[in-house]
Image (tube, helix red, strand yellow):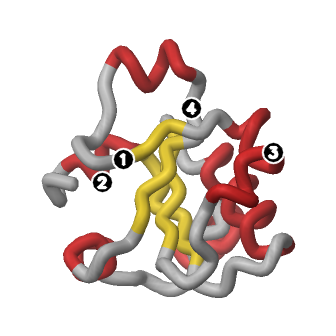
Amino acid sequence: MLNSIRRLLGLGPRMDLGELIRNGAMVIDVRSPAEYAAGHGKGSINIPLDSLKERIPALKKDVAVITCCASGLRSNLAKSILKSNGFNEVYNGGSWHKLKEYEL
């Protein structure tokens, strides 16, 4: 059941997100600017989901990307958008609260 939930949220196999971050992964928080202003992981960048497609040209495709949001649903959509636009190493980090523990 847990694997089914992970697949539904686009999380896939467990990844060491802390290691990815320590190795220079970019963390993109796709929540709204207001949500981001209310709290976010240090070092993350805010690109709201509704503006992600237009911001893709400014992003580096050769860097691992971890997407996050409030619950993991929007970050899963962001992961799909990035993958369909040529990003190879993209991970759904789920909730930004979870990533906060890695001291971005």
Hey, which residue is sitting farthest front in the picture? 58
Callout 1 amino acid: Ser
Q: Which residue is mark 4?
A: 31
Residue 7 is at least partly visible in this image: yes
Q: Residues within 10 Å of mark 1 (few under 14, many from 20)?
A: many
Q: Quadrant of residue 86?
A: bottom right
Horizontal relation, residue 91 to residue 4: left or right: left
For the point 56% across and 49% down, the residue is 72
Please give left or right for residue 50 compared with residue 45 in the image.
right
Residue found 77% across the figure and 65% down from its top: 80
Considering the numbered disc 1 on the image, is that residue within a helix, a strand or a loop?
A: loop
In x, y percent, where is residue 51?
Answer: 75, 36
The first of marks 3 and 4 along the sequence is 4
Q: Where residue 75 is drawn, which disc sits there?
A: none
Q: Secondary structure at mark 3?
A: helix
Q: Are marks 1 and 2 in contact (CB under 8 Å)?
A: yes
Tell which of 53 and 57 is nearer to you: 57
How far apart marks 2 and 4 lie (CA) works out to: 14 Å
